[in-house]
Image (cartoon, rainbow, N blue to C red):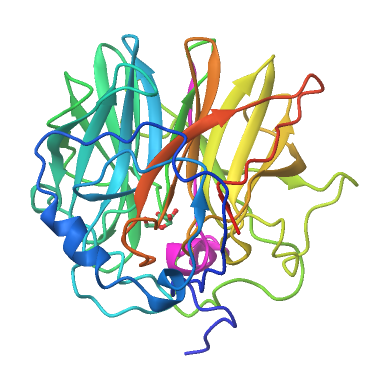
């Protein structure tokens, strides 16, 4: 099989060196503490990262287990974080990201951004999802109809990523999965946004190991190249959610991202094209679609006038972090905006990440101030 030049999800040699801020944020630990897992892995840190001392903008929110891909929401005046739960499963690394072999989700809550982080334990276990085979990747959550919904990508028994949904009466779970994946769903990284009129939309997709490219011709093709090398870049997907939040109400559509020249990005523009990690937030009546550029490691953003787009590229919201993947969420809490993200500060290993938070600023012209979370 042909491999891309820059191996997907293999460790990024991180070159950060000197002072920035060794911890402006209060470090908190979660409940259910068992610090040994993280500490023992940290001793096997890559020598490339150990040789120099990166300076981090924020400190890990959780230190006793590995967490990643934080989707943050405010429910009932509290912040709830729905991350991936990274583990050292021993699965060999490859371009498909098989070493991201996660098996459950924990939900975390915070009364305040600088306050204690509470781990509410296992909210959903892969063994309880009847159709799932492996790899619980980046989840998201929503509240509607008096219920909480957890959306999650996982490979089915045929090794095809699908998106599932599970429900609970509590934001912390436990969540009960539906018997089947969401009909018409595929690929990874669901992000569910509910607009001010109450309509909810799911944004999703991820290329390379996220398999989006395998659906480019309308049906699954396991032989598709990781992404095109000519023509336009592949686009993320979106669908309106049904009122019961358990399925799509209508067709899956492209999320159109245009450059500031009004043209789609060519597939060769790896600095700006969509890779994975979709998120949507609304600010001052505009819709902000943000995403990871994958092998160039940025979180980019584009602005539109409607949740359905089109979105016009505006720049980088978060520069590359330590580790290969970059994944985030943007949330408003008590009148301020926050970026939740992850890096590999605790482990130095690309598949053992830790979640973090920092403040995010919208400029008066609606653009976002680029955040640099680690400095050399
Ligand atoms: O955590 C597994 C995958 O890594 C996510 O689904 C991607 O967004 C990347 O962060």
Farthest front residue in view: 19
How many marks do you count on the picture?
Answer: 0
- Up the image or down, 327 lies above or below 114; here it is below
Kindly identify the residue that appears in the image at 50 percent across and 62 percent down.
215
- Is residue 216 magenta-colored? yes
Horizontal side of residue 162 vs 177, given as left or right: right
In which quadrant of the rendered view does residue 226 lie? bottom right
Q: Quadrant holding ligand 1?
A: bottom left
Residue 150 percent location from the top left of the image: 28, 34
**Percent x, y for residue 93?**
34, 78
- Residue 202 seen in render: no
Q: Residue at x 63, y 41 (%)?
A: 371
**The one of 322 and 148 positioned closer to us in this rendering:** 322
Q: Is residue 297 above or below residue 114?
A: below
Q: Nearer the viewer, residue 318 or 124?
A: 318
Is residue 354 found left or right of 374 in the rendered image?
left
Q: Is 143 placed above or below 277 here?
A: above
Q: Residue furthest bottom?
A: 1
Image coords of residue 373 (percent x, y): 55, 46
Foreground pick, 41 / 127: 41
Most extreme residue toward the right, as rendered? Answer: 261
Which span of residues is magenta-colored? Answer: 199-218
Q: Residue 341 placed where, x, y %?
A: 46, 43
Q: Is residue 192 left or right of residue 337?
A: left
Which residue is located at x 39 percent, y 30 percent? 72
Q: Is residue 230 above or below residue 109?
A: below
Residue 11 seen from this side? yes
Is residue 168 magenta-colored?
A: no
Q: Quadrant of the C terminus?
A: bottom right
What's the residue at 11%, 41% (across, down)? 33
Task: Choose between 205 and 39: the one closer to the eye.
Answer: 39
């Amino acid at each position: 099989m042909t491999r891309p030049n820059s191996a997907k999800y293999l460790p990024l040699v991180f070159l950060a060196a000197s002072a920035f801020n060794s911890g402006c944020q209060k470090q908190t630990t979660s409940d259910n503490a068992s610090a040994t897992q993280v500490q023992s892995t940290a001793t096997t840190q890559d020598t490339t990262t150990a040789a120099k001392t990166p300076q981090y903008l924020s400190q890990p929110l959780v230190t006793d287990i590995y967490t990643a891909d934080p989707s943050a929401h405010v429910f009932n005046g509290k912040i709830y974080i729905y991350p991936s739960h990274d583990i050292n499963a021993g699965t060999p690394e490859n371009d498909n990201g098989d070493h991201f072999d996660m098996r459950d989700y924990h939900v975390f809550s915070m009364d305040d951004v600088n306050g204690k982080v509470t781990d509410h334990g296992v909210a959903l276990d892969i063994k309880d999802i009847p159709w799932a085979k492996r790899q619980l990747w980046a989840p998201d959550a929503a509240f509607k109809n008096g219920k909480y919904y957890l959306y999650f990508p996982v490979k089915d028994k045929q090794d095809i990523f699908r998106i599932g949904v599970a429900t609970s009466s509590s934001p912390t779970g436990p969540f009960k999965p539906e018997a089947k994946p969401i009909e018409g769903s595929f690929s990874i990284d669901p992000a569910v946004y509910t607009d001010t009129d109450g309509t909810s939309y799911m944004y999703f997709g991820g290329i390379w190991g996220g398999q989006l490219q395998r659906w480019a011709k309308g049906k699954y093709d396991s032989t598709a190249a990781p992404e095109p090398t000519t023509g336009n870049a592949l686009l993320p997907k979106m669908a309106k959610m049904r009122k019961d939040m358990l399925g799509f109400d209508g067709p899956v559509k492209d999320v159109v991202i245009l450059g500031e020249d009004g043209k789609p990005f060519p597939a060769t523009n790896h600095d700006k094209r969509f890779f994975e990690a979709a998120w949507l937030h609304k600010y001052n009546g505009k819709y902000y679609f943000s995403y990871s550029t994958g092998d160039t490691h940025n979180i980019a953003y584009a602005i539109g006038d409607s949740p359905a787009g089109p979105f016009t590229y505006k720049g980088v919201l978060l520069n590359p972090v330590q580790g290969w993947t970059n994944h985030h969420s943007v949330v408003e809490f008590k009148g301020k905006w926050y970026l939740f993200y992850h890096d590999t500060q605790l482990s130095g290993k690309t598949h053992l990440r830790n979640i973090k938070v920092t403040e995010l600023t919208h400029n008066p012209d609606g653009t976002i101030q680029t955040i640099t979370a680690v400095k050399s």
